[in-house]
Image (cartoon, grey):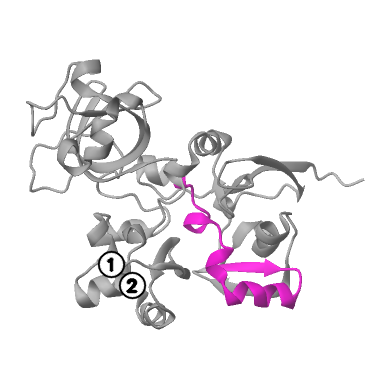
């Protein structure tokens, strides 16, 4: 009998975060421990089998393909060709790095196949069960942290200086980040010089261009709560999910920019509170219904942090259905 022990990977099966148990092969070293170039992705497991057949099946070096700097193995050439037709559909999110670490710390930390989850038909890897559990608890808050420009076209932004929404069917992965385009022709244009367009997207997103590389830490955290008084300086970007409340009524605090307003608060699960500036003007529907405790996802730049309260200038606010 083999000495290899069996591992079991919990995999999310849909957008409602239903869980299913996947039996896998022998435990292999985490991808973070791999050395050499090019890297063997997913410890040699076939990405198409994971997504399409929902099983962990080892590929073979005889059937391999490289995409976004990593080498993927497949059981046969038919499955390999299926991967090559739409590779972005099968590769793990953020190139196999941890989306929770990227969202909370702004760092690219390699995930491991021993700690995997599946959500919205995408594969996510984490360095430990701690990060995986954080993802399972609030998957929508982390699922799109690898989406550049919130899905807008990087080529259109660079060429025409305007935001044009991309489409999921025209997706390209570059250094683990997802780039969407409105057409195949514009996607092909991106492939000619991805570094150029990625740099433009990073600047527009307020990211450090260097932070597109694995292991590189940004000069400022994307999600760390901070106190930035200089409005001209680059400020911390906070992305959170929580329930709405009245800032003045429930917490006795008001917005910095409109202190005469009671304000919109977002109560987080850890007891912290985010006050959304100008919510009465920018999101009147959510503001008027703030007492209802709606679940929302909000992103914005930190203006001030005091105790458990953080004031942000919002960039986006959406109601989570």
Question: In the picture, residue 244 is in which quadrant?
Answer: top left
Residue 16 included in the magenta stretch of the image: no
Answer whether residue 37 is visible to the viewer in this image: no
Question: Residue drawn at (38%, 44%), measured in percent from left and top?
Answer: 103
Q: Quadrant of the C terminus?
A: top left
List the residue tagged with mark 2.
195
> Is disc 2 surrounded by few (<14), some (14 to 19) or many (20+) residues within 10 Å?
some
Does 205 appear above or below 183? above
Q: Secondary structure at mark 2?
A: helix
Which residues, given as a range, are shown in magenta?
A: 70-99
Picture coordinates of residue 64, whole percent (x, y): 66, 73
Residue 55 lies left or right of residue 257; in this view the side is right
Q: Which mark is residue 153?
A: none
* Residue at 38% from the left image edge and 47% from the top image edge: 107
Q: Which residue matches tag 1?
A: 199
Q: Are marks 1 and 2 in contact (CB under 8 Å)?
A: yes
The foreground one among 3 and 175 is 175
Percent position of residue 125, x then y: 56, 48
Q: Callout 1 environment at 10 Å: few (<14), some (14 to 19), or many (20+)?
A: some
Element on which disc 1 rests: helix
Q: In this image, 277 relative to 36: left or right?
A: left
- Disc 1 from disc 2: Cα separation: 6 Å
Up-down relation of residue 317 to residue 262 (above or below):
below
Q: Position of residue 141 (x, y in %)?
A: 42, 42
Residue 187 visible? The answer is yes
């Amino acid at each position: 009998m083999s000495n290899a022990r069996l591992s079991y990977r919990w995999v999310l099966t849909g957008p409602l975060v239903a869980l299913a148990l996947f039996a896998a092969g022998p435990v292999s070293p985490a991808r973070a421990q791999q050395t050499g170039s090019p890297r063997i992705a997913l410890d040699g497991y076939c990405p198409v089998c994971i997504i399409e057949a929902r099983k962990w099946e080892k590929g073979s070096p005889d059937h391999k393909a490289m995409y976004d700097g990593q080498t993927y193995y497949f059981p046969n050439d038919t499955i390999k060709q299926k991967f090559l037709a739409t590779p972005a559909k099968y590769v793990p999110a953020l190139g196999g790095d941890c989306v929770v670490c990227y969202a909370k710390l702004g760092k690219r930390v390699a995930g491991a196949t021993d700690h995997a989850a599946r959500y919205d038909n995408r594969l996510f890897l984490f360095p430990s069960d701690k990060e995986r559990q954080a993802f399972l608890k609030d998957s929508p808050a982390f699922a799109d942290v690898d989406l550049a420009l919130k899905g807008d076209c990087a080529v259109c932004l660079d060429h025409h200086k305007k935001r044009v929404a991309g489409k999921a069917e025209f997706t390209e992965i570059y250094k683990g980040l997802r780039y969407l385009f409105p057409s195949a022709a514009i996607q092909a244009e991106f492939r000619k010089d991805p570094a150029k367009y990625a740099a433009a997207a990073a600047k527009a997103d307020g990211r450090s261009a260097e932070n597109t590389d694995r292991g590189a830490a940004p000069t400022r955290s994307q999600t760390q709560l901070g106190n930035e008084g200089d409005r001209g300086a680059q400020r911390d970007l906070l992305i959170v999910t929580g329930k709405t409340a009245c800032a003045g009524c429930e917490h006795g605090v008001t917005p910095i920019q409109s202190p005469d307003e009671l304000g919109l608060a977002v109560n987080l699960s850890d007891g912290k509170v985010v006050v959304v500036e100008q919510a009465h003007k920018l999101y009147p529907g959510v503001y008027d219904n703030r007492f209802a405790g709606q679940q929302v996802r909000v992103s914005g730049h930190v203006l001030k942090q005091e105790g458990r309260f953080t004031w942000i200038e919002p960039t986006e606010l959406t109601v989570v259905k």
